[in-house]
Image (cartoon, rainbow, N blue to C red):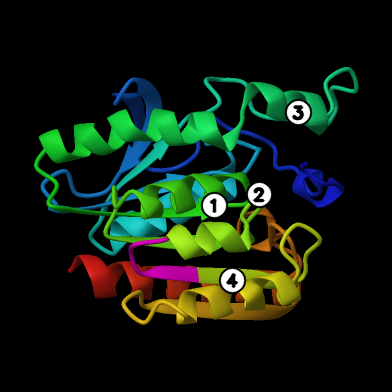
Amino acid sequence: MAGKQCCENPPTLDSSSGVGHVKEFGGLNCYITGPADSKFSVVLISDVNGYEAPNFRKLADKVAAAGFYTVVPDFFRGDPYVPENAERPISVWIKDHGPDQGFEDAKPVIEALKSNGTSKIAAAGFCWGAKVVVELAKCEYIEAGVLLHPSFVTVDDMQGVKVPLSILGAEIDQMSPPELVKQFETALNAKPEINCFVKIFPGVAHGWSVRYKEEDEHSVKSAAEAHSDMLDWFTKYLK
């Protein structure tokens, strides 16, 4: 079950943020940014706050600037989690938006990218989105994946992964505490055919990579480092 940390520091959503544009793609509204002629695509899968979070779109633009055609689908179909809605707590909201449905919805997006001329696809998932990426990685829909402060992911999931996987975790994380992330690493290391990279960021909490506050210098710096690690992983396995 999604914990309290999934709901902390919610962003103010802004559908106009970012330099890209929104259009229907693969059956979902998607924020799309980056060179349309790139053969290398990245799918970014959000946390419960959805695809309009300004920090998330800023990150999508950063990925695009590195040369990747970047797609951020609205897996929640205009219904992101709203902490202020006391009548619909996260435990109720998640029943309508399970990561299993996210995995099913991601498949047409992947197919649309392939039809669009993409030759290689990677995906990164944040909190809720990490579980979707794991499922994509089990079925080899992607060339590589990155999980950032994952939720709902299990050690058993790691045993099913079939593509290179990077896991970027937070020291202060109830959803995937460092000891669980280390278990993920052990499970991946038991599969020598699967390359992995695992890193715990000290002094930051669950969600920090996209929910950082600009005035929190340490979180901003750590988020930038995580973004750089993610881009390095994409570059290694796509280009």
Left of 88 or right of it: where is 159?
left
Residue topped by disc 4: 184
Disc 1 and disc 4 in contact, CB within 8 angstroms: no
**Residue in the foreground of this view, choosing between 80 and 184:** 184
Q: CA distance from mark 3 to mark 2?
A: 20 Å
Residue 165 highlighted magenta (yes or no): yes
Magenta highlight: main SS: loop
Disc 2 and disc 1 in contact, CB within 8 angstroms: yes
Left of 10 or right of it: where is 197?
left
Horizontal and vertical percent position of residue 19: 38, 43
Q: CA distance from mark 1 to mark 4?
A: 13 Å
Q: Determine the secondary structure under disc 1.
A: helix
Horizontal and vertical percent position of residue 36: 16, 43
x 38%, y 35%: residue: 106
**Residue in the foreground of this view, choosing between 189 and 177:** 189
Magenta stretch bounds: 161-166
Q: Mark 3 against mark 4, which lies toward the viewer?
A: 4
Identity, as a three-letter code, of the amino acid under mark 2: Phe
Decide which of tag 2 and tag 1 comes sooner along the chain. 1
Residue 90 highlighted magenta (yes or no): no
Q: Determine the secondary structure under disc 4.
A: helix
Decide which of tag 3 and tag 2 comes sooner along the chain. 3
The crowd level at tag 1 (other Cα within 10 Å; few <14, some 14-19, many 20+) is many
